[in-house]
Image (spheres, rainbow, N blue to C red):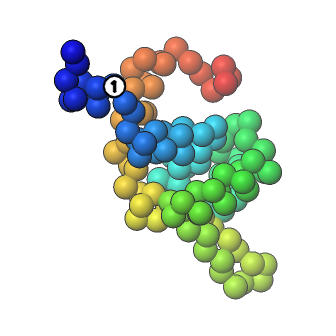
Amino acid sequence: MRSIQTEHAEQVCPRFHRAVELVGKRWTGAIIRMLMDGPRRFSEILEAVPGLHDRLLSERLKELEGEGLVRRQVYPETPVRIEYELTERGRDLERVVAEVQRWADRWLAGLTRAAH
């Protein structure tokens, strides 16, 4: 007979699952990684992430904003300037992103940008 602890250990924590689904969604990790370096304009993110299209970037930024990870800052200039930056909640992912980068550098070292 299995112990309660063993049965519980076999279940995936719903919070963990939600976090992985959120951060692991296509393009989301790359967007978060770009914003780790500071506020960025839409066009800067789009240019820095090969293969990402404007419609998808807009969708992901709205999702991240809705989750409280990204803040959209509008500067009332002419022309209007809009920047996206990580919130405290988003910046709290820095260690996670660094560990994923470390893992990628170790195990995916043979991949190049052209391979994506």
Most extreme residue toward the front is: 1
The answer to whether residue 98 is visible is no
Residue situated in front as seen by the camera: 37 or 18: 18
User: Looking at the rendering, in which quadrant would you find the N terminus?
Assistant: top left
Left or right of 39: which side holds 82? right
Which image quadrant is residue 58 in?
bottom right
**Residue 108 position (above or below residue 28):** above
Which image quadrant is residue 106 in?
top left
| Residue found 77% across the figure and 83% down from its top | 78
* Residue 62, percent from left and from top: 66, 60
- Badge 1, how many Cα within 10 Å: few under 14, some, many 20+? few
* Residue 33, percent from left and from top: 51, 46
Left or right of 87: which side holds 58? right
| Residue found 21% across the figure and 29% down from its top | 5
Query: Helix or strand or loop: what does disc 1 sit on?
Result: loop
Which image quadrant is residue 41 in?
bottom right
**Residue 7 position (above or below residue 107):** below
Left or right of 86: which side holds 50? right
Residue situated in front as seen by the camera: 7 or 14: 7
| Residue found 40% across the figure and 64% down from its top | 88
| Residue found 52% across the figure and 14% down from its top | 110
Number of marks in the rendered image: 1
Residue situated in front as seen by the camera: 19 or 38: 19
* Residue 105, percent from left and from top: 42, 25
* Residue 44, percent from left and from top: 67, 54
User: Looking at the rendering, in which quadrant would you find the C terminus?
Assistant: top right
The answer to whether residue 27 is visible is yes
Q: Which residue is mark 1?
A: 10
Instruction: Kindly identify the amino acid type of the residue bearing the numbered disc 1.
Output: Glu
